[in-house]
Image (spheres, grey):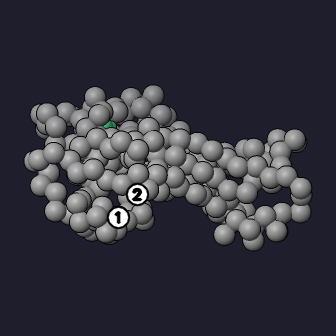
Amino acid sequence: MFKEKIDEIDYPEYEIIVDYKGMKRPPVNSPSWQHHQWQILTYSWLRSMQPESRPVLTGILFYLNELSLFKEDLKLLKDEVQDGSTDIMPSANDLNNLLKWNTKLKAPDLSETFKNERSIRFIMTEDKSISNSLNEFDQVVAEIENSIICEVNGKGIKSSWNPNPEKRTCDACDFRTFCKKSESTKNVLRVP
Ligand code: SF4
């Protein structure tokens, strides 16, 4: 995959964008999956704007929690494996141990190879995908600006913002007890 791109680069040196997240690898159908891609592509574009930059070969994102998953994350991984929404699937013993795991009991040990594979994500930095990510980024910035304007004009937080939440984000959010868009099931005491 990289050899072809290296051959295409008409320059003796290239660069790699590296970033990390303190979280598990998100499922491929989640907003986080796409946002992380946009983020790396936006960094790649920003880097390309600097005069001393070299062509960017690829982006690499590390999901550090994959190296030692919390039990809650392991439960999510089991769900993702069952519904096929993760791109790095376990095989052999890892698959067996995960699928037969009773989530009320001790979490199974997974192989280092599997954990390492899940912790690394390559993001190809093609011109077309960079341009798409910049458009998406512009839209997100425009939405944030509109929400801020609504809030400043007195529309209230709940009416001004239009979140696209994930359960885990909502679980950690201080607004979860009154936010109508919350996906959290923790301490729910919603104000009507
Ligand atoms: S509880 Fe509401 S404000 Fe908080 S993350 Fe979820 S959707 Fe966003």
> Mark 1 is on which residue type?
Pro
Residue drawn where x is 14% and y is 33% of the image:
187
Q: Could you say where residue 62 lies in the image, as x and y percent from the top left?
A: 52, 46
Q: Quadrant of ligand 1?
A: top left
Question: Which of the pair 135/25 is nearer the observer?
Answer: 25
Q: Could you say where residue 147 lies in the image, as x and y percent from the top left?
A: 45, 39
Marks 1 and 2 in Cβ contact (< 8 Å): yes
Q: Check the image and report above or below for 53 versus 1.
A: above
Disc 2 crowd rating (10 Å Cα; few below 14, some 14-19, many 20+) is some
Question: Which of the pair 192/110 is nearer the observer?
Answer: 110
Q: Could you say where residue 143 lies in the image, as x and y percent from the top left?
A: 50, 46
Q: Label 2 belongs to which residue?
A: 114
Q: Identify the secondary structure beneath mark 2.
A: helix
What's the mark number on residue 90? 1
* Quadrant of the frame with the C terminus: top left
Residue drawn where x is 42% and y is 63% of the image:
88
Q: Look at the image and tell me whether residue 180 can be seen.
A: no
Question: Which of the pair 179/4 is nearer the observer?
Answer: 4
Q: Give how far apart the Cα atoms at labels 1 and 2 are.
A: 7 Å
What's the mark number on residue 113? none
Residue drawn where x is 40% and y is 57% of the image:
114
Left-right relation of 70 to 46 = left
